[in-house]
Amino acid sequence: MKVLSTITEMQTEMIKHKASGKTIGFVPTMGFLHEGHLTLLKKARKENDIVVLSIFVNPLQFGPNEDFSTYPRDFDRDRKLAEKENADYLFYPSVEEMYPQKSSVTVTVHERTDVLCGKSRPGHFDGVATVLTKLFHIVMPTNAYFGKKDAQQVAVVEGLIKDFHFPIVLVPVDIVREEDGLAKSSRNINLLPAERVQAASLSRSLKLAQSAIEQGERNPLNISAMIKEMIENETDAAVDYIEIYSYPQLQPLEILKGTIIIAMAVKFTKVRLIDNVIMTID
């Protein structure tokens, strides 16, 4: 596995592989890899000739009161995990390499961002879309792999690829969970021991909601109330939001039909967790 830290080196390698007709699978991350990331790498390895993992903690997607400086980082561990999954390249640029000067052009996302996490994080998805636009041009992937845990991000990336005509196939990958159902996340290490036990209620509440829908419930307000009641009864967390929308359009629904997302965010003492379920209703 080659570790590259400059844009010029990365583009030179990718141009060479593209010219020889090889497919490139790309897994963009902010590092501190967990099993969810490794699942993306495994899928990319199965489906492509060349696999690229990027690790870049992107300052543009952090707000003024968010955790850029404290975001967990462990490059040596990440490098070993990437090697174990047979990645061909690890792209590890510095902030100065990616943003050598103040950008004269950035990307602004107009749709799918005023709900869920985007509602409380203005500018976040502008930062995501800007850095992905840069990374897509640097890596030139055939296929790009994203986890469904951040389903709003997947929806935004779908729009980015479609609107800017990137010749890239977006590959959404199912959420990877702990044995008790908690969605794997780099931030789970910040849960207090008691909170870690309580956090399993997030996925249980989604399963309860899914079951109610399968039994005929079609009122989104009833589903949201059901989820909120379970979380408030079983955890000490504060509910940030519980929302239900069409997917990937992220439009409100009066009656549940078609493909929908049920998404939530809850705040524990030191960490905010998100989870969701996407389902199709006949």
Image (cartoon, helix red, strand yellow):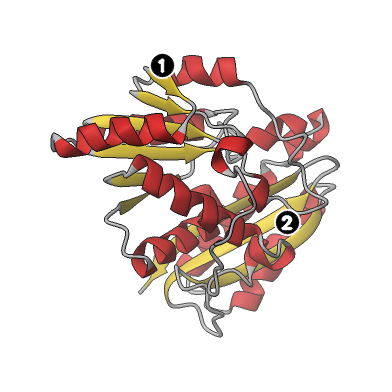
Residue at image x 54%, y 71%? 112
Q: Residue furthest bottom?
A: 254
Residue 136 placement (x, y as % from top left): 39, 48
> Residue type at mark 2?
Met
Rendered position, 3 above or below 129: above
Residue 35 location (% of width, % of height): 50, 29
Q: Which residue is mark 2?
A: 230
Q: Residue furthest left?
A: 21
Residue for point 32% across, 58% down: 166
* Residue with the mark numbered 1: 83
Amino acid under disc 1: Glu
Please state if 72 lies on the left or on the right of 253 as rendered.
Answer: right
Image quarter hosting the N terminus: top left
Bin the neighbour count of mark 1 within 10 Å (Cα to Cα): few under 14, some 14-19, many 20 and up: some
Q: Closer to the camera: disc 1 or disc 2? A: 1
Count of numbered labels shown in the rendering? 2
Which image quarter: residue 262? Answer: bottom right
Is tag 1's residue or tag 2's residue first in the polypeptide sequence?
Answer: 1
32, above or below 269, in the image: above
